[in-house]
Image (spheres, coloured by chain):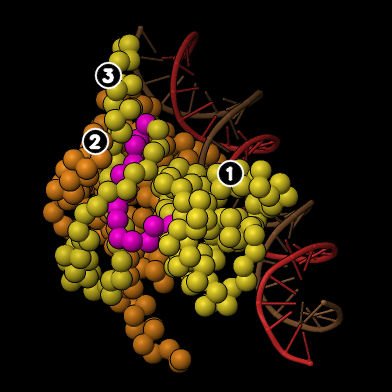
Chain colours: A orange, B yellow, C red, D brown
DNA sequence: TCGTTTATTATAATTATTATAAATTAATAG
DNA sequence: CTATTAATTTATAATAATTATAATAAACGA
């Protein structure tokens, strides 16, 4: 697979920020950008363990922090133990399955009215918001309806 | 301070669920209901350590889980390390200060249209959503504007 | 290619949370 | 009121995610 536009742009941004490129860093970033999922640090570590048998988990965490600071990835935290990471920084929202934990993107016009209302009510200077929807994905709905009660 | 209506209702609900009342449990619940903040498990533990010098942190965690399962409190997870707990189960949203971490409630009509749109786009069966606004609270704005650059 | 600076590795430390097992205590039937 | 029993608390250990540290290795501009 050729390097996607998205990946090329991200690499470019890092270079402009004076960040050195290493094989590990490149692989972590590429993995995040190419995957449709929203992997945890450990999932990334596992996924790249064939390619980099000696890579340390610390490298994954260090790079994820770096990418986050550079605005290339977003950290998602839910009730469960570990953070998930998303290289899609375009405006979009997530819907999460309560049963299997799957995270799917969906589109909706950004909720700027809410930001404004919140700012007015609280006096905060607002810069962003986060919103997720919870429910049951198609396959978990089916599993539920065919289950014996 | 007399027991608030809110606390009385919560105690009632627990009794109906066949849950035993203990001094620790009562104190944790009362603390959560009376505080305006959104404390972590450890903050609760600290706050009650005078009253219960021998209480175990596990007791705090156990009870918080219990309250959550009973629908009496809500667990809030943000990027930072530990969960926060909110005994206000009325519909409301939070705005969070990026600088000092303060969490303040604000009101806005529940975003059911978003739930519907998400359901339509993804095929999920939706049951709830979560949304928070981020920014800088008044005192942190002032601190910033008076700071020497 | 060299030298400096940054990144990676291996490992240990930290922190939040959960599990376990023994001791205690609340609810309640008698 | 007391004894019973099942739930709760406590103390402690275990787990798991993440971060810190120090030594080694690699990137990249001169």
**Which label sits on residue B145?**
3
Camera-side residue: B44 or C1? B44
Q: CA distance from mark 2 to mark 3?
A: 15 Å
Answer whether labels 3 and 1 touch (C-beta < 8 Å).
Answer: no
The magenta stretch spans residue B13: no
Residue A37 in which image quadrant? bottom left
Provide the residue span drawn in magenta. Answer: B87-99
Q: Residue at position x 22%, y 43% from top?
A: A121
Residue topped by disc 2: A123
Identify the subunit bearing mark 3: B
Answer whether labels 1 and 2 touch (C-beta < 8 Å).
Answer: no
Q: Secondary structure at mark 3?
A: helix
Up the image or down, D23 lies above or below B90; here it is above
Q: Residue at position x 28%, y 75% from top?
A: B125
Return the disc, 3 or 1, that comes first in the chain's sequence.
Answer: 1
Residue B27 in which image quadrant? bottom right
Identify the subunit bearing mark 2: A
Q: Both on one chain, marks 2 and 3?
A: no
Up the image or down, D30 lies above or below B77; here it is above
């Amino acid at each position: 697979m050729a390097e996607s536009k998205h990946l090329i742009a991200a690499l470019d941004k890092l270079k402009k920020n004076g960040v050195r490129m290493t094989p590990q860093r490149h692989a972590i970033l590429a993995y995040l950008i190419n995957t449709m999922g929203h992997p945890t640090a450990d999932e990334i570590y596992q996924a790249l363990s064939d390619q980099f048998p000696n890579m340390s988990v610390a490298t994954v965490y260090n790079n994820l922090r770096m990418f986050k600071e550079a605005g290339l990835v977003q950290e998602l935290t839910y009730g469960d133990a570990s953070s998930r990471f998303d290289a899609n920084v375009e405006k979009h929202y997530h819907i999460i399955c309560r049963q299997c934990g799957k995270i799917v993107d969906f589109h909706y016009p950004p909720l700027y009215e809410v930001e404004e209302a919140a700012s007015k009510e609280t006096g905060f200077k607002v810069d962003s918001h986060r919103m997720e929807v919870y429910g049951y994905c198609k396959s978990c709905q089916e599993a539920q309806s065919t289950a014996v009660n």
